[in-house]
């Protein structure tokens, strides 16, 4: 059970709101109360003096992150994280801390996914981190991997043909997190293939209604050098020259 004990009203409000939204059991405490026997960890702010052996102190990070840290520390003294990633147009991410599902959600780009993971690992202060990523969506997968290579993170690639498929990307990420993978030892290739370029051109027609972006613009979008909307606008301007 998580206990909330802080004199910081803004933090208190945000914690209560997030805990209720995530349906996580908690108890609200005051400094006059005895701490109940079933409280495993207390969330407080760095300004508060709390006499308890397991206190997680908020230091300005996102409220959901401090809640996640408390959930993980309620089951052990050190934090071990496994991320599952389902690469694709929508990137599913699942977080497991000390073998417990913490949360799962969707991100929209490799940069957003990798940036979140690097920031999260630092703020949660994990003892060890493993990222398991599905082997689909080659370019998106490889871009995420390349953004994480060099971090103190073990990266594994999971063969998605060996696990149960889900239409929900976040649930698929959970399945990937629980599967065994093959360790990735370095950067991956992100040079688009002809079929991938043609598919991006097809997507540009669908999104714009009329415009097919050039192969060079499609290549830049696939490598993460520009957004599809920007490529369509560039092509539109070229077509009117």
Image (spheres, rainbow, N blue to C red):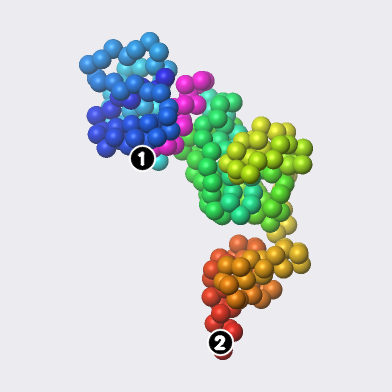
Q: Is residue 158 above or below residue 57?
A: below
* 102 on left or right of 166: left
- Residue beneath label 1, please? 60
Q: Quadrant of residue 52?
A: top left
Q: Measuring 64% from the left and 75% from the top, which residue is drawn there?
A: 212
Res 28 visible:
yes
Q: Is residue 192 above or below residue 98?
A: below
- Residue 77: where, in percent of width, then height? 50, 21
* 232 on left or right of 141: left
- Residue 60: where, in percent of width, then height? 36, 40
Res 127 visible:
no
Mark 1, secondary structure of its residue? loop
- Residue 209: where, in percent of width, then height? 58, 72
Q: Which residues are magenta?
A: 63-77
Which residue is situated farthest in the left direction here?
32
Q: Measuring 29% from the left and 32% from the top, which residue is drawn there?
A: 12
The disc, 1 or 2, on the residue closer to the chain's N-terminal end is 1
Q: Measuring 59% from the left and 78% from the top, which residue is drawn there?
A: 235
- Residue 172: where, in percent of width, then height? 63, 40
Q: Measuring 69% from the left and 44% from the top, which residue is drawn there?
A: 134
Which secondary structure class fits the magenta region best? helix
Find residue 143 and name its label: none
193 drawn magenta: no
* 184 on left or right of 68: right
Q: Quadrant of residue 29?
A: top left
Find residue 240 and name its label: 2
């Amino acid at each position: 059970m998580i206990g909330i004990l802080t004199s910081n009203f803004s933090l208190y409000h945000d914690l209560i709101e997030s805990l209720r939204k995530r349906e996580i059991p908690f108890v609200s405490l005051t400094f006059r109360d005895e701490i109940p026997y079933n409280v495993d960890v207390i969330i407080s702010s760095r300004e508060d003096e709390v006499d308890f052996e397991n206190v997680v102190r908020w230091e300005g990070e996102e409220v959901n992150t401090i809640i996640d840290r408390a959930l993980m520390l309620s089951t052990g003294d050190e934090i071990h994280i496994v991320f599952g990633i389902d690469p694709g147009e929508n990137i599913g991410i699942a977080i497991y801390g000390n073998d417990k599902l913490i949360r799962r959600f969707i991100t929209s780009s490799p940069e957003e996914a990798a940036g979140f993971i690097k920031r999260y690992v630092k703020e949660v202060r994990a003892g060890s981190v493993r990222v398991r990523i599905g082997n689909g969506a080659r370019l998106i997968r490889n871009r995420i991997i390349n953004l994480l290579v060099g971090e103190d993170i073990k990266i594994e690639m999971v063969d998605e043909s060996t696990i149960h498929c889900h239409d929900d990307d976040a649930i698929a990420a959970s399945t990937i997190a629980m599967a065994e993978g093959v360790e990735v030892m370095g950067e991956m290739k992100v040079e688009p293939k002809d079929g991938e370029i043609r598919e991006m051109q097809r997507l540009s027609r669908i999104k714009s209604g009329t415009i097919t972006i050039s192969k060079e613009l499609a290549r830049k979008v696939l490598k993460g050098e520009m957004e599809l909307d920007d490529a369509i606008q560039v092509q539109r301007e070229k077509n009117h020259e």
